[in-house]
């Protein structure tokens, strides 16, 4: 058994938090030999509900759960954190785009970025889930600039999982048969789910699916799935979002399988012409907490147009929050 790691989760009494904490405690993220201490942050009015979640975590008697700490103060909740899931923030309603949340949610990530830089462990890795997650991660990274830039992540794994599920359903395979499915850009309608390199049991998706379907219905379904869920459930995705957060941090911790890649919103160093410093989702490989953008993926006019569009949107979101980046 390894020494326990400290895992901070914000918005711990919320819908995603409720689906996420039990999976982390069960060993679904860091493995069955990795104990965890959960450090949970909520707003003051959410603390009572969080106490109920803590009772349920205790009552689950998870062998790997070596401690639970709760606070409404980020400076306490992030103390010594090795891993952080930044979930706490408002979800959108069906009339809104994710970008409409920037002014409500952006400021949260200034304080939390600073608190992480001041109190977290030196090996910290951070996943921003709260929307709009790319720009919130940008805000947190700027506020916590003592933390190396490659430690900050935004979640587009849900988009990757959705893309895999759509392709699997189309060709009559299971989602686990789909590999090399990359998401480029923003976690928004402008993202590019890149079917061009994806494989089903090693066969090119472009040979198995109609190109027009891939370029139209497939891209649109993946890019607008969050809204479709809000319209159907009356609330934004929660269990699938928690599952994707587990997948993201698990891939970072355990590494990606040989020959495959995944999607992570990370700080651009200019790869594929993306302006340096934007938090941009790329196809990446990961190993032991570090990641690398997959090099040499060929681009075509369709991909270039979508990538240019999603860059433009991220630049515009960055302009909107420029006062939070000072
Ligand atoms: P929710 O409203 O059910 O829960 C959010 C929780 O966060 C609440 O308990 C609230 O009290 C708490 N909170 C708010 N501000 C906080 C702060 N400053 N510090 C600590 N806690 C705070 O919402 P949810 O369904 O859990 O969604 C959370 C966020 O995740 C939303 O912004 C949503 O849009 C986003 N989301 C992202 C993805 C993705 O793929 N990146 C997927 C689904 C949802
Ligand atoms: C999602 O993709 O399901 C989330 O980002 C929630 C939303 O607002 O779409």
Image (cartoon, rainbow, N blue to C red):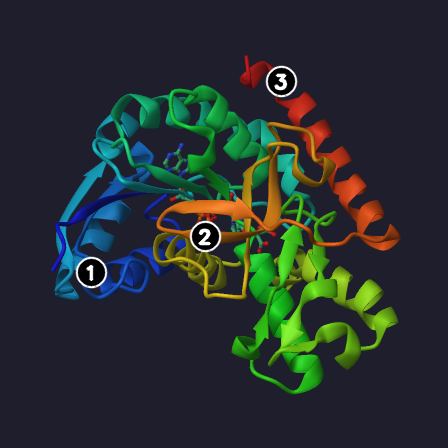
Task: Determine if residue 91 is in view.
Answer: yes
Q: In the displayed structure, would residue 71 be above or below residue 298?
A: above
Q: Secondary structure at mark 2?
A: strand
Q: Earlier in the sequence, mark 3 or mark 1?
A: 1
**Foreground: 106 or 322?**
322
Q: In the displayed structure, would residue 77 be above or below residue 54?
A: above
Q: What is the x, y in percent for residue 209?
A: 78, 78
Kindly indicate whether the residue at mark 1 contacts the one at mark 3 (C-beta within 8 angstroms). Answer: no
Q: Secondary structure at mark 3?
A: helix
Task: Determine if residue 233 is in view.
Answer: no
Q: What is the x, y in percent for residue 131?
A: 55, 41
Label number found at residue 322: 3
Around disc 3, counting alpha carbons within 10 Å, would you say few (fewer than 14), some (14 to 19), or many (20 or more)? Answer: few
Around disc 2, counting alpha carbons within 10 Å, would you say few (fewer than 14), some (14 to 19), or many (20 or more)? Answer: many
Residue extending furthest toward the bottom: 172
Mark 1 vs ligand 1: CB under 8 Å? Answer: no
Q: Earlier in the sequence, mark 1 or mark 2?
A: 1
**Foreground: 199 or 18?**
199
Q: Secondary structure at mark 1?
A: helix
Residue on which disc 2 sits = 286
In three-dimensional space, the C-alpha distance between marks 1 and 2, rounded to whole angstroms, equals 33 Å
323 sits to left or right of 57? right
Q: How many marks?
A: 3
Residue displayed at 33% across by 34% down: 43
- The quadrant of the rendering that contains the C terminus is top right
In three-dimensional space, the C-alpha distance between marks 3 and 2, rounded to whole angstroms, equals 31 Å
Q: In the displayed structure, would residue 148 be above or below residue 41?
A: above
Residue on which disc 1 sits = 56
Mark 2 vs ligand 1: CB under 8 Å? Answer: no
Give the quarter the ligand 1 occupies: top left
Residue displayed at 16% across by 64% down: 62
């Amino acid at each position: 058994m390894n020494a326990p790691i400290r895992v901070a989760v914000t918005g711990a009494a919320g819908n995603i938090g409720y689906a996420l904490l039990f999976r982390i405690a069960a060993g679904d993220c860091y493995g069955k030999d990795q104990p965890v201490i959960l450090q949970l942050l909520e707003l003051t009015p959410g603390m009572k509900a969080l106490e109920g979640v803590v009772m349920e975590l205790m009552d689950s008697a998870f062998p790997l759960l070596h401690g639970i700490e709760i606070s409404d103060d980020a400076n306490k909740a992030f103390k010594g954190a090795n891993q952080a899931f930044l979930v706490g923030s408002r979800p959108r309603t069906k009339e809104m785009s994710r970008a409409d949340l920037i002014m409500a949610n952006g400021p949260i990530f200034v304080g939390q970025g600073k608190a992480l830089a001041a109190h977290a462990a030196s090996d910290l890795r951070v996943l921003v889930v709260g929307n709009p997650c790319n720009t919130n991660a940008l805000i947190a990274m700027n506020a916590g600039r003592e933390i190396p830039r490659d430690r900050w992540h935004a979640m587009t794994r849900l988009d990757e999982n959705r893309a895999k599920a759509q392709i699997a359903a189309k060709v009559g395979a299971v989602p686990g048969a789909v590999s090399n499915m990359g998401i480029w850009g923003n976690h928004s309608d402008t993202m590019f789910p890149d079917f061009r390199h994806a494989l089903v049991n090693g066969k090119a998706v472009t040979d198995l699916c109609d190109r027009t379907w891939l370029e139209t219905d497939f891209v649109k379904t993946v890019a607008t799935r969050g809204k479709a869920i809000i319209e159907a459930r009356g609330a934004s995705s929660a269990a699938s979002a928690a599952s994707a957060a587990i997948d993201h941090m698990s891939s970072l911790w355990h590494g990606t399988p040989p020959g495959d890649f995944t999607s992570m919103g990370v700080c651009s160093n200019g790869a594929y012409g993306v302006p340096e410093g934007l938090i941009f989702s790329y196809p990446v490989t990961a190993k032991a907490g570090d990641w690398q953008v997959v090099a040499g993926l060929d681009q075509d006019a369709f991909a270039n147009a979508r990538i240019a569009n999603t860059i433009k949107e991220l630049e515009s979101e960055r302009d909107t929050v420029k006062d939070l980046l000072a």
